[in-house]
Image (tube, rainbow, N blue to C red):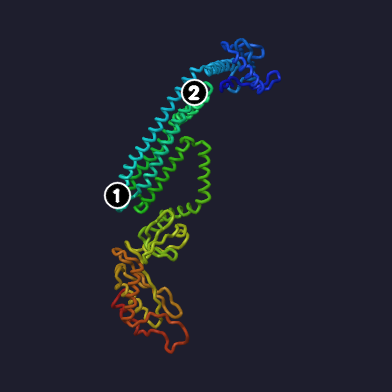
Amino acid sequence: MLANRPVMVFRAPLLGIPPAERVWRTERILGARLNLGGPNQVTVKNEPQGSAIMLDGAFITLLQPDDVDTLTGQTLDMATQATVAALEQAIAETREGRDHQRLLRGLGALAIATVLLAAALWGIVRFRRWIIRRVARVVTRAAENVRVAGAPLVHSTRMLEISARFVGLASWLLFALFTYEWLSYALTRFPYTRAWGEQLDSFLLGIVLRIGNGILKSLPDLVIAAVILGMAKVLIGALKPIFKRVETGQARGGWLDSDMVGPTRRLSSIGIWLFAFVMAYPYLPGADSEAFKGVSVLVGLMLTLGGSSLIGQAASGLILMYSRTLRVGEYVRIGDQEGTVHELGSFTTKIRTGLGEEVSVPNALVLGGVTKNYSRTVQGKGYIVDTAVTIGYDTPWRQVEAMLIEAAHRTPGILADPKPRVVQTGLSDFYIEYRLIGQAVPSEPRPRAEVLNSLHGCIVDVFNEHGVQIMSPHYLGDPAQEKLVPRGGWYPPPARRPQEDPTHS
């Protein structure tokens, strides 16, 4: 090293002298020869052992073939020429370091550069204050104009804080850049530190060139990735009118109806974007780097460990949608929850009960349980309404059926067509179980609980009017009189004989 510059490199011992000691001896000989003064002319003398480096005719050191870096394809002649050039430059800077006039000129240039640096930093501070005030006015005005329901959507104080941080970060970057350039310039003004300044310049320039070369090399791959993503966007745009026509009823898509077009559109868009991203991934800058691979492994691990339940719920939601097990607006019973389907989500099904509650049921629970649908088999829109009563054997069954049907006709919200019907669902030991089945009025979408409440009230009123108790007798002993209905009492009001009402037998 001479004047902080590398002059030559020793890689092998010479005559038993190790490389480190060769460096020490060469530096001492070179320093001693420079102190003697003279023209300091560097020459080379070819010897059988290698190239002898001479200074003013005096031997300095010897470069042998083993000192050449063969990995870079360098030869002994190339290494000798590089050594002579580096030595001449270092000698010139050593001579310059002894010139007091040049040192004074360097100090003057450094003083001017310092004044310019101070002026630039002062200008950055003033500009930062001005831009912060300008941004504050713009952000305050924008925050006042962006309102939802009369309330500001964003708070100007928080936006001002974020804007000030961004401006401060930019100003500090400019501070660092100007200071870095000033330091590099200051070091290059003096021979002894010029090598350090040049290293700073080359470091910054190397970073800029590396970034620029990376951008230029990545442009073709980025163009290919952009084309792939653009084709995906065009395909999604081409499918949008088709889904729109099916959704508005202008076209029919076979298995695709208006209820399924929304989820199908979203799923197709997600599938197209995922496929496009997989195709474009290899063309993204850094896709083959270890960082990208690590992120991919992390995402896969997270999906494997924590996404099994989430994926199961989403798959259950897709099965429910495309199997048409449920539809929005249908009245269903899932487990012990009963109400109108309000939303079929990807992970949960939301039901609104007749009591004003909204219940979220996991899709996996819906798919794995028993679901009663009161709306699927009705004529048109609406839902099934049913209730059960148990009456003893001493009450004519024809009378019970007639009373239940009359109560259904009186109930607001139950259709007369199709007609309500009564089914005897069980002959127990002490009573008969009757189930009344009707259909709610589709033009009056009342909660099923409210319709049932009105129906129960009408049943109680009709049974009271005809003197029939709604009771379920139980056996405690043999009754004094057999619980039979004589043939003459088979058709008490409101029951009708077959000739009066052909629908009854």
Looking at the image, is 458 positioned above or below residue 158? below
Residue 29 picture location, percent across and down:
63, 17
Looking at the image, is 469 positioned above or below residue 36? below
Q: Residue at x 51, y 48 (%)?
A: 302
- Judge the density around disc 1: few (<14), some (14-19), many (≥20) Cα neighbours within 10 Å: few
Q: Nearer the viewer, mark 2 or mark 1?
A: 2
The dot on residue 490 is none
The dot on residue 250 is 1
Looking at the image, is 362 positioned above or below residue 503? above
The dot on residue 188 is 2
Quadrant of the rendered image containing residue 433: bottom left
In the picture, measured across the screen, residue 423 lies left or right of residue 417, that is right
Residue 376 shows in the view:
no
In the picture, measured across the screen, residue 495 lies left or right of residue 60, that is left
Closer to the camera, 389 or 497? Answer: 389
Q: Secondary structure at mark 2?
A: helix
Q: Residue at x 50, y 18 (%)?
A: 100
Q: Amino acid at mark 1?
A: Gln
Closer to the camera, 273 or 187? Answer: 187
Closer to the camera, 169 or 247? Answer: 169
In the picture, measured across the screen, residue 243 lies left or right of residue 482, that is left
Q: Amino acid at mark 2?
A: Thr
Residue 14 picture location, percent across and down:
68, 19
Quadrant of the rendered image containing residue 469: bottom left
